Amino acid sequence: MRIVLDTNVLVRANIRTHGPAHEILLTLLVGGHTLITSPFLLAETERVLAYPRLQRLWRLTPQDIQEHIGLIEKISSLVHPVVEAPVVLEDPNDDPVIYTAVSGKADVLCTLDRDFFRRDVIQFAQRHGIRIFTDLQLLSQLMYE
């Protein structure tokens, strides 16, 4: 399966966590599936991990953040999506994420962002063969394959 993890999942998969996102990343490390990412997702993940609110929560050092980004880069297939037309109308900043999935020919886009679960976004994704899952849905799918 070809999988794109949205920033909100990549952030929750860091080395200081033990939730579903972290389990997904560990499953992808074992192999059998392809993680798709883009420069946008990597940069946004790095930026978000440095937010003061998240620093108070996880106390990640700059080295921890770089190691997390490095791991994602190492295990993923990097694509350079082109945003052709707006898709996520409620938050156009999410368009690079959906276009990462399109460019990477992803089977699944895993996100916790409710804007991706709007009917028009789901229909766009379906036209490109992409299913949109939460982290719990994806983890369940990975465990039964």
Image (spheres, grey):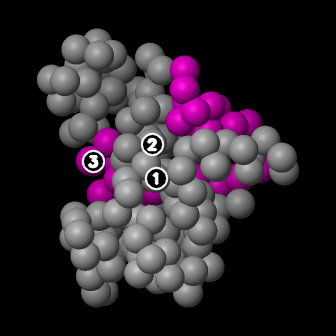
Residue 58's x, y, as percent?
33, 16
Q: Which mark is residue 65?
A: none
Residue reaching furthest to the right: 145
Residue 64 in magenta stretch: no
User: Which numbered marker is on residue 43?
Assistant: 3
N-terminal of the pair, mark 2 or mark 3, is: 2
Q: Dot 2: what SS? A: helix
Alpha-carbon span between mark 2 and mark 3? 14 Å
Marks 2 and 1 close (CB-CB < 8 Å): yes
Quarter of the figure with the N terminus: bottom right
Asked whether 24 or 35 is in front, the reply is 24
> Dot 3, crowdedness within 10 Å: few (<14), some or many (≥20)?
few
Chief secondary structure of the magenta portion: helix
- The residue segment tinted magenta is 18-45
Which amino acid lies under the numbered mark 3 shown in the image of this protein? Ala
* In magenta segment, residue 38: yes
Going by the numbered disc 2, the residue's amino acid type is: Val
The residue wearing badge 1 is: 111
Q: Nearer the viewer, mark 3 or mark 1?
A: 1
Choose the circle earlier in sequence order: 2 or 1: 2
Q: Tell whether 1 sits left or right of 16.
A: right
Q: Which mark is residue 9?
A: 2
Residues packed near mark 1 inside 10 Å, few (<14), some (14 to 19) or many (20 plus) = many
| Residue at horizontal 72 percent and vertical 44 percent from the top | 140
- Where is residue 13 shown, x and y percent of the image? 48, 32
- What residue do we see at 67% from left, 42% from top? 139
Q: Earlier in the sequence, mark 3 or mark 1?
A: 3
